[in-house]
Image: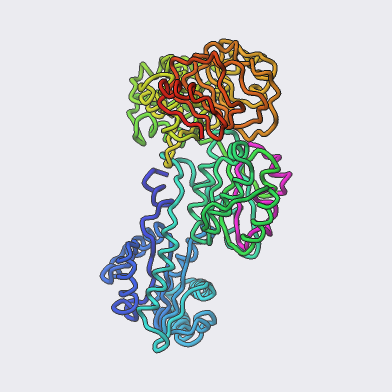
Amino acid sequence: MDMQSFVSSYGFSYDVFLSFRGKDTRNGFTGNLYNALRNKGIHTFIDDKELRRGNKIMLALEKAIQESRIFIIVLSQNYASSSFCLNELAYILKFIKGKGLLVLPVFYNVDPSDARHHRGSFGEALAKYEKKFSANKGFKNYTQKLEEWKMAMHQAANLSGFHFKDGVRYEFEFIKEIVELISSKINRAPLHVADYPVGLESQVLKVKLLLDIGSDDIVHMVGIHGLGGAGKTTLAVAVCNSIADHFEALCFLENVRETAVKHGLQHVQSNLLSDVVGEKKIKLTSVKQGISVIQHRLQKKKVILIVDDVDKLEQLNAIVGRPDWFGHGSRIIITTRDKQLLACHGVKRTYEVKELRKEHALQLLCWKAFKLEKVDLCYRHVLNQAVTYASGLPLALEVIGSNLFGKSIKQWESALSRYERIPNKEIQEVLKVSYDALEEEEQSVFLDIACCFKEHELSEVEDILCAHYGHCVKHHIGLLAQKSLIKISFDGKVTLHDLIEDMGKEIVRTESPKEPGKRSRLWFSKDIVQVLQENKGTSQIEIIFMDFNLFEEVDWDGYAFRQMKNLKTLIIRSGIFRKGPKHLPNTLRVFEWWRYPSPDLPYDFHPKELVICKLPKSSFSSLELAALLLEKASVLSSF
């Protein structure tokens, strides 16, 4: 599937496809509806009456149907008298099966029950066709065709739609009601899938079959599992976009694992409620309260929900505890690395993300490395070699392609020769090749971000790292983004994929596998508490970033920083400290401590390179030292 056809499949060329009987409504109701939709900016397909005279009309209409997201069927008095309309209707209903697309019948001056039970003009038209077919021996399989038409008419008439009758209401009001509904459906912006989405189509269809969109009487949960970096979230989002029009509300709970650790599960619950109910931040005091509110507020809502990257059963119990928390017809998509977690939660419908097939892997690599779908055949050998090393993992392909963007064949061969020393199964080490290619300072910036600043605002990261490296850090961050080692999200946050994050943290861990105090960066709660309480800090430590959902007491004597002679950044945003520090390194450039536990800073603290100092929610009272810090820091906050 090429890129253009993927855009058509998931982005849609038309918002609305109009099916109607030309002689009944083209110059009246349907024409007015088309103009109203167009004036609202809704891209609508309406066939030209001259088009119907061409031999290839059905092919053109089929293509338009395949590229549309909503179908309006105007069932009028003479609709069934047109075999063309009946064939079009049958094709639409066959095409949408299992895809979750929306069909809206409009009963224009006809009784819905007549269409449903083939009475009135609908029954008369079908009877004429039956008589015509039976009298002409040239018509083969006419019985099958008639049954197909009858079934399509019955199916369409059973769908929820609109009914208009002359004299009951104004037509312009009726049209306005339809347009408002369509507008509300298409104004829900689709979630971003991927820059270069390949190999998704077949997997999307398989997951949609598991979701069983046609059954509105029950709630289905489907789990998507697989290796980190395999494309679980990408697949879930692509599926969600293709069926979103069938639901009252859509919610994408991204990175649940990280959000729960940093902010608590009630924060995730609050996001779910806010997105579905449409209210601003809903405050919850506990997870138990969140469960109760979710059950009460969402049990009548038909929602499509993605619960992304869960790693603990308590997360699922707090967010999607039971199907009856949500309205009939709701669909829950869960992504995780742990298949057993799904089984423990009773999720029986699961899908394992598959590795990209070779042709799709080649396509993704070409898009990333050359910005083209196909490249010169002379690159075939090195491309095949790179695909083999990546083992079909989309993230690995993106990183390799970005790393070799614009390179010559010799440069490809040189880089790939390095991959040969790394086993294919060791994906972390494959990704590390991109890290090894960076300059020393670029590597340092990457490790800072991977260990401490994932999902932080870009402006905050730049401010902190500028204190370390100067303004060139903006260039470094841009280069890391180009290399696919980090990404800047649409809402201005610095992010990176799980596997790349793990790679960076593993690099730092291996600096001293058994003694955290001898590592350059500390971010893990147990490591930080151990170093502080046992006074095991060393001159190797450059950054301490304590930002996690931790409320345990840190029992220390205050002298832990004495040996940290190269500590440049100290950020403490959690933990309960009964004592303040007896010593702080004068090498600090960034000093942030929420609820600083002392009214004074250490007497021997005389930082000469301090750029940022923040002591929010603290009882800091040493005015003379505050003045001293203000002279040396670009930011000072003790509130």
Q: Residue at x 46, y 27 (%)?
A: 485
The answer to whether residue 516 is above or below residue 4 is above
Q: Nearer the viewer, residue 231 or 490?
A: 490
Is 444 above or below relative to 182?
above
The span shown in magenta is 318-346
Q: Is residue 139 above or below residue 370?
A: below
What residue is at 42 percent from the left and 41 percent from the top?
490
Q: What number of labels is visible?
A: 0
Q: Would residue 106 be found to the left or right of residue 51 on screen? A: right
- Between 55 and 589, the one lying in front of the other is 589
Position of residue 375 measured from the top left corner of the image (x, y, whole percent): 34, 31
Residue closer to the observer: 70 or 135: 70
- Viewer-nearest residue: 248 or 111: 248
The answer to whether residue 285 is left or right of residue 452 is right
Q: Is residue 168 visible?
A: yes
| Colour basis | rainbow
From this view, report whether residue 233 is shown above or below residue 10.
above
Residue 36, how many percent across, how many down?
32, 70
Q: Quadrant of the N terminus?
A: top left
Residue 465 visible in the displayed image: no
Q: Position of residue 289 (x, y in %)?
A: 68, 52
Q: Quadrant of residue 481?
A: top left
Is residue 516 magenta-colored?
no
**Residue 326 lies in the magenta stretch:** yes
Q: Say which residue appears at 53% left-offset and 38% top-offset.
A: 231
The residue sitting at the left extreme is 50
At x 54%, y 26%, the residue is: 571
Relative side of 209 to 244, left or right: right
Q: Residue furthest bottom?
A: 167
**Residue 288 point in image, percent of width and height:** 70, 50
